[in-house]
Structure formats: structure tokens, C-alpha cells
Amino acid sequence: MVDQGSCVEIMYPDLYKGLNLKPEDLTIYDSPLLSFEGKVVILKGQIRIPVQAGSEVVEVDFIIVDIYSPYMAIVTRPWLHTLGVISSTLHQKVKYPSGDRIEELVGDQSMARRYLMSAILYQPAAESSASIEGGL
């Protein structure tokens, strides 16, 4: 996901595990971070890894969080600025200069809808049991 309004790149547990990262690969990141709901997020640490976008490779500092998300990662202003990206949320694509040409990364509308529905329908076990108990 591309978030033009944030300044911290985020990596979620599925990608962290998929890359076989371990706690010893991380450096400490101790600044507080708030979720989209305004809750304090549990941080595992920070890691700098190369991310390939088309033919460009950019080193990205990801903050590893331990919360559910339908996304694997969120890239933000530092990544966008490093590549010189122009993004369009309407068209779900980003364009950026690469050498003597313009490269383009295109999002997948149907996948974005599935992610959105997954996020809307997701209820952590603790919240869902609390809401059931509260309704009795």
C-alpha cells in the first residue's frame, strides 16, 4: 500500500515472517506509533532492506509492527521522495523517472477491494469475544 500522508514505512507480520527475519536482524525503534484507529502499536523494531520497484532498488527503513493488517507493507513519503514518484490514488499507479524514461507501477483494483473487505471484516479474538459478552 502507498500512503502519501505518512512518513514511516511499515512492515506487517506476514511479510516479516515470509522474509525469514529474526529479532536479531532488527534494530531498536522506540518512538511511539499510532494505528489508523489511534491506538498505540506494539513495535518489534526497525530494519533497512532493499526494495525493488521496476528497475530501481531503494534501501527502505521499515518499522516492524505486531498487529493485523490485510497489507504486507506500507510505503510512504520517504520511499516516494527517494524514487521521485508521482502517485495517483484514482488510477492506483505510481510513475517515476528511471534513467531516460518514465517507469510505472500499477495497482490491482480487485486485490485492493479484497484487502479493504478483509480489513473491515477482521475482528481480533479478544474484541469479538468482548462484544459477544457485552451483548448478553
Image (cartoon, helix red, strand yellow):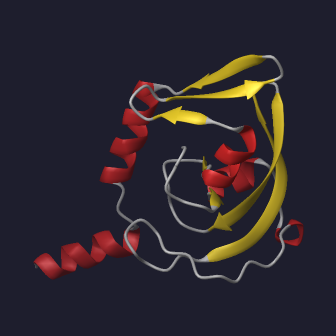
Of the pair 97 and 34, the residue shown nearer to us:
97
Residue closest to the eye, 97 or 55: 97
* Quarter residue 37 falls in: bottom left
Q: What's the residue at 83%, 22% (across, down)? A: 99
Give percent across and percent down for residue 65.
62, 67
Task: Determine whether, in the image, residue 123 is placed left or right of residue 77.
Answer: left
Farthest-out residue, front: 100
Residue in view at x 22 percent, y 74 percent = 131
Indicate the position of residue 41 as horizontal and vertical percent values: 53, 75
Against 118, residue 66 (above or below) is below
Q: How many marks?
A: 0
Q: Position of residue 13 (x, y in %)?
A: 64, 58
Name which quarter of the figure residue 32 lies in: bottom right
Q: Position of residue 1 (x, y in %)?
A: 54, 43
Farthest residue in the right direction? 24
Q: Left of 132 or right of it: where is 7?
A: right
Quarter of image, res 114: top left
Q: Is residue 32 above or below residue 67?
A: below
Q: Quadrant of the C terminus?
A: bottom left
> Looking at the picture, does residue 97 appear above or below residue 46?
above
Position of 97 compared to 24: left or right? left
The structure residue drawn at horizontal position 54% and vertical position 59%, both measured from the top left corner, is 6
